[in-house]
Image (tube, rainbow, N blue to C red):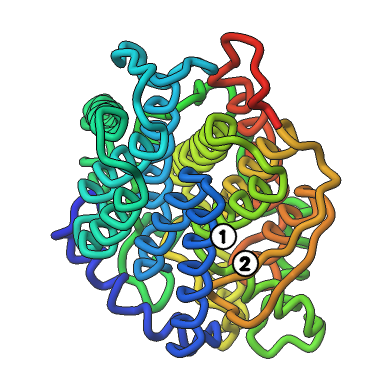
Amino acid sequence: MFARPSTTAIRVFISRLARIAAITGVATTLVTAALAEETAVARTDQNRGNAVTHWNAIALDAFAPTQGTNPLTQSRALAILHAAIHDALNAIDRRFESYTPGLKAAPDASPDAAVAAAAREVLVTLVPEQAMLIETAYNRALSTLPDGPARTAGIATGQAAARATLTRRQKDGNETAAEPAYVPRPDPGEYQFTAPFTFALLPGWGRVQPFAIDLKQHTLEGPLPLSSAQYARDLSYLKSIGDIASTTRTPEQSEIARFWYEDSPLGWNRIANTVVRQQGLDPWSTARAFALINFAMADGYIAGFEAKYRFRFWRPVTAIQQTSPSWQPFLTTPPVPDYPSTHTVVGWAAAQVMIELFGDKMQYSATSLTLPGVTRHFKGFSPAAQENGMSRVYAGIHFQHAVKDGQRQGRSIGRAVAEGLAPVRSTRASR
């Protein structure tokens, strides 16, 4: 899962999950119930015949145990997964541009077998600790398909698509993203490690090769000057609303903070899965939608982390404790610099792709692993993305300016990514 699994800092990060779970109110039994609900969704998808949404749900099951550890590698793996699925289907019937060109055409192959084989190959490679879950799902999927040349050709096509995508991304920079280690400087405004962490996560992730964007087209100006009146207002507001014992944060704002605290790739893929099923898309259009959404999230983390470690801006807890040493944020501050809020970048990137594909008036419901049992309802993707961004302010872990600029960067990335994997011929598959 991680760029360097042996890195002591990342092992420490994982060991703190129990504390984070306690803070966010996640009980083991409730998490188990949430995972069971996702598995039920996956089985329903399979019964409905949409292999792409089915394998998206299986992938979320595979990543759920790593909730809170490393959403960056989740985003990369999910982008690779859906690129491979997209390419496998388009080798069977070329309706959209491929992510990795050159795959051999297979017009007689089974689409469901191709999707299953592509997903299995990618997930076993990138999430080997979940091999049992993945192999069980794969064998179940194949058991529903008649044996014969179509299934055999589908398996070969899916495997070829997965291997081509994995090979293309093999040396994309993720393997050295933990280096060099971040060393804080003592200057005012400089990011310092935040308790309970004694490290900064993946300072080189901004060097990972993007999936679909040119980083230079999505740059940001930087955090507010510490001497500015706007920064002073930002600091004062955050100190009040983000305090663990805040009297200004409303119960709903506290709920929003906990609800959206979950890893962005898991939450936004669940939303996408719900929306795609509501839209009744066929597998080809489903595969394209998932690929674009996950490209946008993966590239959002890359662009956001490039800015984070370029500007190295301190987190609210560090700034506020300069004058109020006992102040504590409502939720645990992740071990990365403040600017921009990549949670916001990634959420808006995913939302903007869906706005470009489906418009901004769809009604849907969403759930969360970090607040099981709670369902929030939305009309449009903008309200969800707005809530997602502000959740970091309510949690006391991001300045509003980091959220505001994160929104701008995320929307820019989403618009650019949504133009990718273009149709190559007229088709009835779009909706």
Q: Name the residue located 71 percent from the left edge and 52 percent from the top edge.
A: 385
Q: Image quadrant of residue 62?
A: bottom left
The quadrant of the picture occupied by the N terminus is bottom left
Q: Which mark is residue 98?
A: none
Q: Name the residue located 68 percent from the left edge and 59 percent from the top edge.
A: 388
Pointer 2: what residue?
A: 260
**Label 2, residues with CA under 10 Å away: few <14, some 14-19, many ≥20:** many
Q: Nearer the viewer, residue 368 or 157?
A: 157
The quadrant of the picture occupied by the C terminus is top right
Q: Image quadrant of residue 84?
A: top left
On the image, the x and y values in percent for residue 132 come to: 21, 64
- The amino acid at mark 2 is Trp
Q: Name the residue located 48 percent from the left edge and 60 percent from the top edge.
A: 42
Q: Nearer the viewer, mark 2 or mark 1?
A: 1
Label 1 element class:
helix
Q: Nearer the viewer, residue 186 or 242?
A: 242
**Eyeballing the image, is 346 above or below 43?**
above
Q: Is residue 269 visible?
A: yes
Pointer 1: what residue?
A: 267
* In contact (CB < 8 Å): disc 2 and disc 1: yes
On the image, the x and y values in percent for residue 100 come to: 36, 19
